[in-house]
Amino acid sequence: MAQDVQRTHYRRFSPAQRFEHFVLIIAFIGLAITGLPQLFAGEAWAQSLILALGRIESVRILHRFMALLLIVEVLYHVLSLAYKLLVLRQSASMLPRRRDGRDLLDWLRYTVGRLPERPRMAHYNFLQKIDYWLTVLSILVLLVTGLLLWNPIAVTGVLPGGAIPVAQAIHKNQALLLVLLVVWHTYNAFLKQFNVSIFTGNLARRIMLEEHAEELETLESGEQTPGASGEQVASRARRFWPVAIVVTVLVAAGLIRYLTYQQTAITTVPRQNVAIFAPDVQPAAGDAAIGGALWSTLRCPICHGPQATGGPEGAPALKGSSGSVGKTLTFEKFYAQVRNGSDKMPAFRPEELPDGYMAHLWAWLSSKSTS
């Protein structure tokens, strides 16, 4: 016991948990770097960053790659939790409990000087649980709305057209909230006390004493909760892995099918030389709400502005008081202009900008709405 008391660090994270954190950090940084410039495409810093990353097509490809990395991390995390709960029979230590409410009240009382000592908290305290569940909920919201935006045309075949702009609004606002949450988490878990356990796996005793005094007392007393025997774990693992593998394969196959179901406007294609007006849809089939949501997913806002009211480099306004496609062009001329391009405007082939997109964009650009 005396030797334990003299220890300066205690094991906090396993190599697998540290690797999970590393993947999550990479995915978040990648999503932030590629997502925020698209959200603030009208700002000079955003345009400079987009150009530095290889223009908007590369930014959108990188954003989706990082989203896939996040999806893989989520699937791994769920599989890891299932293994710990069902095979190792570990307790669900991140679930909120009554004592977390008591610890919160005691912590507030200590903060204002009503208690002489900080509350003695367990392996995960109430602040870490709040942090964890806010992150989980944020990621789930971002993944659901992001998947809806991945294939907007296919989604609107099942859901109302208004689902796309709603998903877009939720996605961007939740992304901003998650950025703020990560900044708070970085300060609280890393900068506040220079806690580097996420990289080393070990937590300093002084931090353990302050934030996990109850666990520290258990560790230094030598008390350990008896675990299951190796035979029991092996028996449960034999039943767990076949089911887990089948479920994982089915989920992965479903995601791959959905993500590759429809060609999106992400692919960069060579400029065409000839375009014939022969659209598969008519302008009456366009939905202005869907067109407004699609606009921000294309590279058009880089030149014409996030609301199509003109860009910083002199690109003409296509919408608003200073210009309107509906007033100056027929749908036929609009279609031919987009398909042929010009000296300053790239051409868009059907593989990149389907006719269905064209009808929705025409409806939005011709409308008075700015959203």
Image (spheres, rainbow, N blue to C red):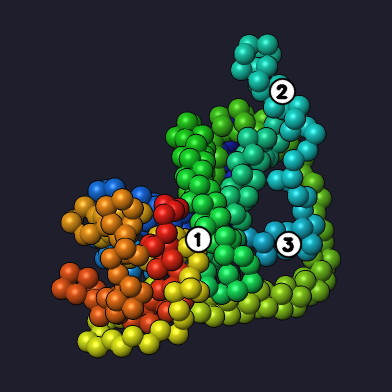
* Quarter-of-image position of residue 140: bottom right
* Mark 2 vs mark 3, CA separation in Å: 32 Å
Relative to 366, is 25 above or below? above
Describe the element under mark 2 as helix, strand or loop. Answer: helix
Query: Which is more toward the observer, 72 or 296?
Result: 296
Query: Of marks 2 and 1, which one's residue comes earlier in the chain?
Result: 2
Residue on which the image places disc 3: 82
* Mark 2 vs mark 1, CA separation in Å: 47 Å
Question: Which amino acid, mark 1?
Answer: Ala
Residues at circles 2 and 1 in contact by the CB criterion of under 8 Å = no
Numbered circle sitting on residue 105: 2
Residues at circles 3 and 1 in contact by the CB criterion of under 8 Å = no
Q: Count the marks: how many?
A: 3
| Residue 130 visible to an observer of this rendering | yes
| Residue 67 visible to an observer of this rendering | no
Few, some or many residues within 10 Å of mark 2 (<14, 14–19, 20+) = few
2 vs 1, front mark: 1
Query: Of marks 2 and 3, which one's residue comes earlier in the chain?
Result: 3
Question: Which amino acid, mark 3?
Answer: Ala
Query: Of marks 3 and 1, which one's residue comes earlier in the chain?
Result: 3
Few, some or many residues within 10 Å of mark 1 (<14, 14–19, 20+) = many
